[in-house]
Amino acid sequence: MTTQQIDPQAVTPVALKLPEAITISDLAALMRIGAIDVIKQLMRAGHMLAINDVIEFETASLIARSFGFLVEEIEVTQDAPGSVVISPDEEDAEQLEPRPPVVTILGHVDHGKTTLLDAIRKTNVVAGEAGGITQHIGAYQVTRGGDTVTFLDTPGHEAFTEMRARGARVTDVAVLVIAADDGVMPQTIEAIDHIKAAGVPIIAAINKIDRPNADPERVKRQLSEHDLLVEDWGGDVISVPVSALKGEGIDDLLDNMLVVAELAELRANPNREGKGVVVEAQLDKSKGPIATVLVQTGTLCVGDIVVVGGIRGRIKAMLNDQGERIKKAGPSTPAEILGLNGLPEAGQSFDVVADDKAARTMVETWERERSLSSRVSGISLEDVHAKIESGEVAALDLIVKTDVQGSIDAIRSSLEGLKTDETRVNLIHIATGGITETDVMLAMASKAVIVGFNSEPQPFARTMARQEGIDVRFYDVIYNLVDDIELALKGMLAPVMEDIVEGYATVRALFQLGSNVKAAGVYVNDGRISRRAEIHVMRNGQMLFSGPMSSLKHFRDDMRELTAGNEGGIVLDGFRDFQEGDIFEAHVTQQAE
């Protein structure tokens, strides 16, 4: 089979619709031009690529235009990669129907989250869990007077935020559990900050009111210190006293969830193809991959072809939260599905497609976009002013970790003093301790900058922040911290500079060039030694000198740089007490990426 060749001069200008990314072979097929000719044209443009390589829209459009085509980009309608935000505004208003609220229960460890959910569901969950701690993410439904509530049972705010960081914003109401005898604890504060960052309505469940030392009023006072004013005190946060162990106050709590849901007017269209989010996935030895999904809109049915990122499959069976087989699941309904060809990640969106061909196309498109995209989740202090000016962000969101509790109030008051009508600093989370993976995950989900005051990141958190493009700043003086934030808000912050080691050289000989001038004969072991570098003279692990070079030579020739494997002579400006075996480290300062 031969590919039809078209004379570029004879092509009538026609509109060619191209996606964000396309393989060279697919582009050639669309234009009905030989792939070899396309590769040659790419080579003329400076791109050395193979037939199966993926190119971006800009490159593809350039090549297509060179062959006489007009180019249009295929519009992508989703909000963002992995986003599962489904707006009722995009649906047919006549098809919208009320849907159950999705509720997440969060709080400090041992404050009774799982026991509360156990009391709500009337099933013994705690007995089957190690140490009474939730070991998985599940989704369950409870019926109350004809109304239904869906619960996401998460191990903590980390999982709650991890799903948000992947684009899955599924929670309609957050229930914050606080023990009446213990009060607001560090994990409670973290949960509050994570819920606020998600912009979800909060119901405070004051648990363990049956305890002799229970003090609900103290809990309310502590909540007010974190800008959560309960209705009893004139605020808008609903608080419900409960005893999960004795089952007291559960009905009142459910009624208030339904009231909050009614005020939110939660609606979805059940008369369309199903779409939603993966809550968890596991591999069963006998059944294969099993995914727990939450339907957000439409109706999911047995036999539907589902695509989740790079995974696809036809639903062979579907189970509800009680383990019973069901044939369909509507909006806000959790279900276990069997039939996928792999394990998806929690927080990934799923779509129902018409046939296997459409499924393969979606998977291929997802894989191409993933190969081209770079994951940059946060913003940097340098560009925050421009983003506020353009309306892309409304405020500078910060996560602050300090060394001691006493630093928190000083930093908080100093940053609050920077708020103006045009700019605003939003402290998403401030606490003591090192910077953790949870902090990085929260920064990803909230597009925030992390600030460490005498606080360093844990090793994996540092790596994770670098991979995800999260800006992490470190300070040991409060004034410097506040000054940088103020300059960032004004768009005047200087770029961050970092010290880079260019190369290493070993001193092998000494040369006296004059009464006061001595040169070091060096061998470059690694990297390079450039004329612009500052040399650190190291001996037995100690730095003896740091300063610029006054001369860099290779034999008699002046050099701009010496690379690994070469010898040369170096004269330092202000130091001549070399010894054989000394190590020269070449340092340069450049703007951080």
Image (cartoon, rainbow, N blue to C red):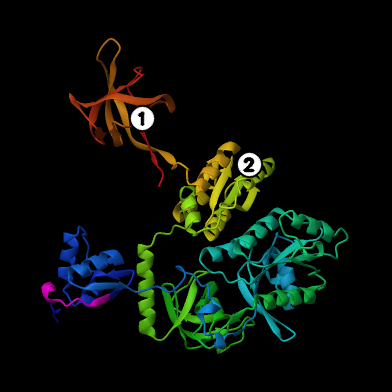
Whether the magenta-drawn stretch holds residue 578 is answered as no
Indicate whether 140 appears above or below 545: below
Which residue of the protein is positioned furthest toward the top in this rendering? 515
Q: Quadrant of residue 264?
A: bottom right
> Residue at horizontal 64%, vertical 62%?
195
On the image, numbered disc 1 is attached to which residue?
534
Mark 2 Cα within 10 Å, few/some/many (few <14, many 20+)? some
- Based on the picture, tell me whether residue 14 belongs to the magenta stretch: yes
Q: Judge left or right: residue 508 versus residue 170.
A: left
Percent position (x, y) of residue 361? 35, 78
In the image, which disc is placed on residue 568? Answer: none
Say which element carries label 2. loop
Amino acid beneath label 2: Asp
- Tell me which segment is drawn in magenta: 6-16
Q: Residue, x 68% and y 82% (percent of image)? A: 148
* Residue with the mark numbered 2: 403
State if disc 1 and disc 2 touch (CB < 8 Å). no
Seen from the viewer's position, the closer of residues 554 and 480 is 480
